[in-house]
């Protein structure tokens, strides 16, 4: 695992956008796995700026989701489908056909999980997966004690994660879905390159456990230690526990 300490979130975004640009120059139709949340936004902004400036050709890029809420209609502004379309797919000038994600509004959620896991493999696998980290060490929506070998499946959110995410639902925790679909940790580990960005002091403890603690299901992000090409990019505040 490579750990890179950058001065601030913007520098982290630039660095990771540079890695995506390099990937696209080698493999124009690369499958880019994207995380939601506030942390990766500087990556998407930096990448969009490069594309707009003509420095990167992303026209053949493909984008896939990491996770999704269960029960929100697909068009809900806070469904992760909507968020990824709004923050990544549309700014990069891609069409909806370049994008794949699990169907959180399906009547058959278990079937939707299996179908998405299979679809990722059939698409050739994720080339570069961008990850954030929850304050409790989760990646995607793999909450603490998720199996390190888990596949895409339904999970129940912890109260902490629902509190953390209530800001996207007018601060009202009752509107945050309880159930989600997430790529499993085993699924995430199949990506060719994992890049986790963490910024701010609130992530310092989770980062320290991820990087320096034992590999343990209680800290899902610690599974990155098992990956042959994992990069953890942290600003100085998030690195303060290292
Ligand atoms: C959610 C997402 C994760 C994300 C996490 C942290 O739980 N499912 O993929 O990493 O939030 O979000 P933020 O970056 O806003 O702190």
Image (cartoon, rainbow, N blue to C red):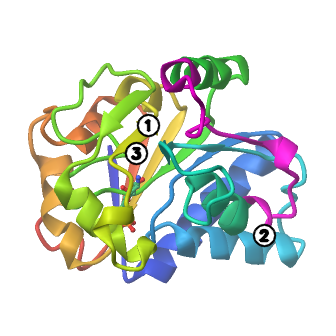
Q: Residue at x 58, y 69 (%)?
A: 43
At which x and y percent is residue 47? 70, 68
Q: Residue at x 70, y 22 (%)?
A: 124
Check contact, mark 3 vs mark 1: CB within 8 A. yes
Disc 1 marks which residue?
A: 182
Image quadrant, ligand 1: bottom left
Mark 3 vs ligand 1: CB under 8 Å? yes
Check contact, mark 3 vs mark 2: CB within 8 A. no
Of mark 3 and mark 1, the one earlier in the sequence is 3
Circle 1: element type = strand
Disc 1 packing (10 Å; few <14; some 14–19; many ≥20): many
Q: Quadrant of residue 32?
A: top right
At which x and y percent is residue 131? 44, 52
Q: Residue at x 63, y 36 (%)?
A: 127
Taking the image as shown, residue 211 lies to the left or right of residue 16, namely left
Disc 3 marks which residue?
A: 140
Q: Residue at x 45, y 26 (%)?
A: 152
Closest to the observer, 26 or 52: 52
Q: CA distance from mark 3 to mark 2?
A: 22 Å
Say if 69 sits above or below 90 in the image: above
Of mark 1 and mark 2, the one earlier in the sequence is 2
Of mark 3 and mark 2, the one earlier in the sequence is 2
Closest to the observer, 52 or 178: 178
Q: Name the mark nearer the viewer: 1 or 2.
A: 1
Closest to the observer, 180 or 15: 180
Residue range of the region highlighted in magenta in the rendering = 89-112
Circle 3: element type = loop
Q: CA distance from mark 3 to mark 1?
A: 6 Å
Say if 170 sits above or below 130 in the image: below
């Amino acid at each position: 695992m490579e750990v890179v300490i950058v001065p601030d979130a913007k520098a982290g975004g630039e660095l990771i956008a540079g890695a995506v640009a390099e990937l696209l120059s080698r493999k124009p139709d690369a499958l880019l796995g994207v995380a939601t949340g506030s942390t990766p936004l500087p990556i998407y902004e930096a990448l969009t700026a490069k594309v707009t400036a003509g420095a990167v050709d992303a026209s053949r890029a493909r984008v896939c989701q990491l996770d999704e809420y269960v029960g929100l209609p697909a068009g809900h502004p806070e469904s992760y489908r909507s968020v990824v379309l709004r923050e990544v797919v549309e700014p990069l000038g891609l069409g909806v056909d370049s994008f794949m994600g699990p169907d959180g509004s399906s009547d058959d959620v278990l079937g939707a999980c299996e179908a998405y896991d299979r679809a990722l493999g059939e698409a050739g696998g994720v080339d570069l997966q961008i990850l954030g980290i929850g304050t409790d060490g989760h990646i995607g929506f793999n909450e603490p004690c998720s199996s390190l070998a888990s596949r895409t499946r339904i999970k129940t959110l912890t109260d902490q994660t629902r509190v953390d995410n209530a800001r996207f639902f007018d601060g009202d925790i009752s509107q945050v879905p309880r159930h989600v679909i997430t790529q499993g940790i085993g699924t995430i580990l199949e990506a060719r390159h994992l890049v986790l960005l963490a910024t701010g002091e609130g992530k310092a403890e989770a980062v320290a456990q991820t990087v320096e603690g034992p590999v343990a299901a209680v800290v899902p992000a610690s599974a990155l230690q098992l990956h042959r090409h994992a990069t953890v990019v942290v600003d100085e505040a998030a690195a303060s526990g290292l």
